Image (cartoon, rainbow, N blue to C red):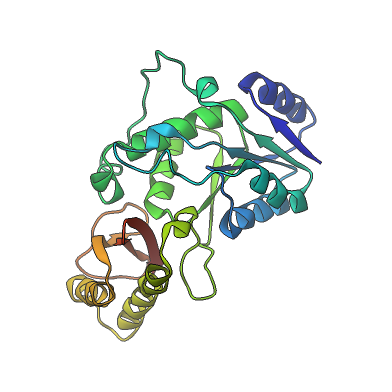
């Protein structure tokens, strides 16, 4: 059984009845075009909570001018078919008009975290992400929010928002799900040409190489970043950023230490891909 809810009032009414039964609610927010990475989040949520809600909503406010909002892949029939194996499941499918009214003026920004890396390349992106996630948390009131680590900056930004604004929801980070060749699963992978798809595997290969360098006692982040850049550019990638950061604060690190993350954003053709690895 998959139950669909298309308005805020419908899903609030259902979840109010759930809370009265003292059942735990897990929440997996998505923009649809579900891949195995999304499905892994749902599987983990099913193991850890009594009721799992999945939202499918392509949020317009996290896309900038000339970004891919209108061509972002959508296939509701395919998504619902992929969800059948996880029944019972509760799916929130709101329309834009139900999420943002015409006079919407309220936004959430996380100073110092959302204005660098992906935030520098996509200036209004995190403002849209934090605002829509806050709205969804207020609508669904989940006990647990399940998020993948591939979008590592997003994960840290949302952790900070949840902490600062006293949301009761606990965020549960989940490991990045990868294709057999190491490429992190993403809805945007479908944009890649066959040639670029092959070249994009060098993102994870370069991150693994960097981790090996640290294991072999090289801790200078500049040297490590330069080696990653060399591999990516030799294989036709265009670097947006490569950085070694503190895994809790996203502060840049000159010396690589255990607990750091190497985060990266790369263009292959017109497709921007992100990834990271924990040291």
Task: In this rendered view, identify the residue nearer to me: 78 or 255.
Answer: 78
Residue 131 appears in view: yes
Residue 279 seen in this snapshot:
no
Q: Residue 121: percent from the left, percent from the top?
A: 25, 47
Say which quadrant the N terminus sits in.
top right
Locate residue 71, reporting x and y percent.
Answer: 43, 43
Quarter of the image for residue 253 reads bottom left
Residue 31 spot, x, y in % from top left:
52, 42
- Left or right, 266 with respect to 54, comes to left
* Identity of the residue drawn at 51% across and 24% down: 99
83 in relation to 168, above or below: below
What residue appears at the point 39 percent right and 32 percent down from the top-left corner?
A: 61
Picture quadrant where residue 114 is located: top left
| Direction from residue 222 to residue 277 in the image, left or right | right
Q: Residue at x 62, y 32 (%)?
A: 93
Q: Is residue 86 left or right of residue 196?
A: right
Pinpoint residue 190: horizontal percent, then vertical percent: 48, 58
Q: Quadrant of residue 5?
A: top right
Location of the C terminus by quadrant is bottom left
> Does 100 appear above or below 219?
above
């Amino acid at each position: 059984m998959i139950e669909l809810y298309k308005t805020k009032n419908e899903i609030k009414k259902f979840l109010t009845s759930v809370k009265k039964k003292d059942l735990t609610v897990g929440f997996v927010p998505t923009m649809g075009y579900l891949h195995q990475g999304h499905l892994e989040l749902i599987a983990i949520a099913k193991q850890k909570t009594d009721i799992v809600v999945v939202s499918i909503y392509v949020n317009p406010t996290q896309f900038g001018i000339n970004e891919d909002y209108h061509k972002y892949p959508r296939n509701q029939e395919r998504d619902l078919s992929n969800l059948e194996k996880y029944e019972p499941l509760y799916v929130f499918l709101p329309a834009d008009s139900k999420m943002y009214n015409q006079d919407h003026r309220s936004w959430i920004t996380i100073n110092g975290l959302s204005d660098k890396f992906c935030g520098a390349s996509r200036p209004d992106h995190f403002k849209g992400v934090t605002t829509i996630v806050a709205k969804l948390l207020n609508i669904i009131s989940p006990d647990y929010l399940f998020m993948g680590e591939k979008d590592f900056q997003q994960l840290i930004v949302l952790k900070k928002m949840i902490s600062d604004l006293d949301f009761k929801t606990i965020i549960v980070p989940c490991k990045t799900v990868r294709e057999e060749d190491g490429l992190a699963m993403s809805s945007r992978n479908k944009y890649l040409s066959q040639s670029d798809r092959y070249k994009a595997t060098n993102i994870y290969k370069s991150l693994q190489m960097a981790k090996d360098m640290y294991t072999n006692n090289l801790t200078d982040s500049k040297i490590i970043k330069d080696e990653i850049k060399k591999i990516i550019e030799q294989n036709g990638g265009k670097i947006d950023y490569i950085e070694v950061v503190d895994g809790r604060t996203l502060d840049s690190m000159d010396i690589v230490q255990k607990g750091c993350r190497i985060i990266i954003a790369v263009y292959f053709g017109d497709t921007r891909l992100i990834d990271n690895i924990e040291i």
